[in-house]
Image (tube, helix red, strand yellow):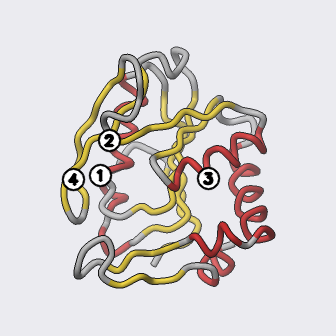
Amino acid sequence: MAALVASRLRDIPDFPQPGIVFKDFTPLLADGAAFEALVSDIAQRYRGQVDVLVGIEARGFILAAAVAYELGLGMVPVRKAGKLPGETLKESYALEYGTAEIEVHTDAFEPGQRVLVLDDVLATGGTAEACAQLVERAGASVAAIEVVLELGFLDGRSRLAGHVVNAILTV
């Protein structure tokens, strides 16, 4: 699976700002067979082990929705601050190129639900760490954090101590 993912990534230099090399995985999404293989790979790893999936805005939505569908489970969006209606929990975090906030609805989870957090890239770990904190503050537990690509040189995994983390491809 790692080789398939690697073959469908492309580098976009200086995005979203100069000096950043953005790892774009939209070519993987555009390849139906590759996307199906990715979703199946993730789903088989967690079948029967999770109750609900979380997708982190924005590419995480795509992955989580597809895997949730494959597993017959629900999907909860974790969004940038100000995008969800109703009462929310908010968490701030640092990015490799700035700071941001994410939110989840206060009633998004049942107490004790086992949650799979899905995102496209693990970089500094700030987004995944903030998301895990939101899930736990909302009364659920993080069963695992799954990413398609880990930027190992940024050591984001170190911020996720105590959580099961799986990356399909690490560069």
Residue identified by numbered label 4: 94
Q: CA distance from mark 4 to mark 3?
A: 23 Å
Which amino acid, mark 4? Ala
Q: Amino acid at mark 3?
A: Leu
Q: Secondary structure at mark 3?
A: helix
The N terminus: image quadrant: bottom right
| Mark 4: secondary structure | strand
Kind of residue at disc 1:
Gly
**Mark found first going from the N terminus, 4 or 1:** 4
**Count of residue discs:** 4
Image depth: mark 3 or mark 1 in front: 3
Mark 4 to mark 1 CA distance (whole Å): 5 Å
Q: Position of residue 9 (x, y in %)?
A: 56, 79
**Mark 3 highlights which residue?**
63
Vertical side of 4 occupied by 63: above or below = above
The residue at 77%/56% (across/down) is 40
Which numbered disc covers residue 126?
1
Viewer-nearest residue: 151 or 11: 11
